[in-house]
Image: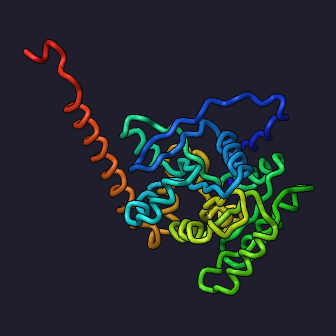
Amino acid sequence: MSILTPIAPPKPQEELKVAPKARQVMIESIPVTDYPTREALLQAIVDEAKRPGTSVCLGMNAHNANMAHKNLFLKKLYQRAEIVYCDGAGVILASKLLGDKIPVRYANGDWFFEMWDYFAAQNCTTYYLGSAPGIALKGLNMYEATRSKHTVLGVHHGYVLNDPELEAQVIAEINALKPDVLFVGFGCPLQEEWIAKHLHELNVGLCYAIGASMDYVVGVKPRPPEWLGNIGGEWLFRLFCEPKRLYHRYLVGNPWFLGRVALSAVGQKLTGSIKAPLTPAARH
């Protein structure tokens, strides 16, 4: 796990200032919100988790965008999600092509424990469902070893999709605990499909599709150097580590995604030019 500057805990309520509303960038008809800081993103998650009903939080990167492009069910989940944030350099580049750049991505594998700290400071309870057997528990033990208190109510491995009885037991446990935030880490699109399927029966404040973050936290998968991630090279690092599994995702998927966005940007410019009224000088 990369060691980054700790996320600043929220200030007491009386000191909080009203933050400006985060802007949204439409990428393939999915609204991606540009959160100026990690704290702003985490506070938005806490706020949504405390509202009535069950909200959805999703990260957007080139792979997820490709999955949503091929799967209308997944795309509709992205369109209805209360929070969609930038989770990859491909989305930053796509937003730049569209003329409305999102300047920063948020890869929570770098600061997962700090995110738990932030939620604890807000008295926001969580539950983690995902990863292979033993991984989530190992992560929780690592976290508890350096914290005197926290608000993690429980964890469970993610191998429940092919075991309906176990899946029902886990859902029952989650509903009994009533966490504010339920992390679901199956990988895209399985985690999003699971959230959409069970959203109506989950007694939680917010479902957060978290991907393989816990695997990075416990060291099952290596994280790139911070500087490489900051310049958009995380995909290159991951491709080097797992070339057989990821070559199609990055070497084929990334150009496909950016190509679609580039065509969309050209189309928008042409449409805008056609619709733009002629100036008096241009009419003669």
Q: Is residue 1 visible?
A: no
Residue at image x 71%, y 79%? 133
| Residue farthest left in this picture | 284
Percent across and percent down for residue 224 are 58, 55
Q: Is residue 45 left or right of residue 259?
A: right
Percent across and percent down for residue 229 are 55, 49
Q: Is residue 178 visible?
A: yes
Residue 98, relative to residue 244: is it above or below?
above
Q: Is residue 38 left or right of residue 231?
A: right
Quick one: 41 or 247, which is closer to the camera? Answer: 41
Image quarter (top left, top right, bottom left or bottom right) of the C terminus:
top left
Image quarter (top left, top right, bottom left or bottom right) of the N terminus:
bottom right
Q: Is residue 56 left or right of residue 69?
A: right
Residue at image x 56%, y 66%? 196
Quick one: 144 or 151, which is closer to the camera? Answer: 151
Instruction: Answer with the quarter of the image where residue 7 lies.
Output: top right
Percent across and percent down for residue 193 are 53, 69
Residue 169, relative to residue 43: is it above or below?
below
Percent across and percent down for residue 93 are 42, 44
Q: Is residue 278 left or right of residue 225?
A: left
Instruction: Answer with the quarter of the image where residue 151 lies.
Output: bottom right
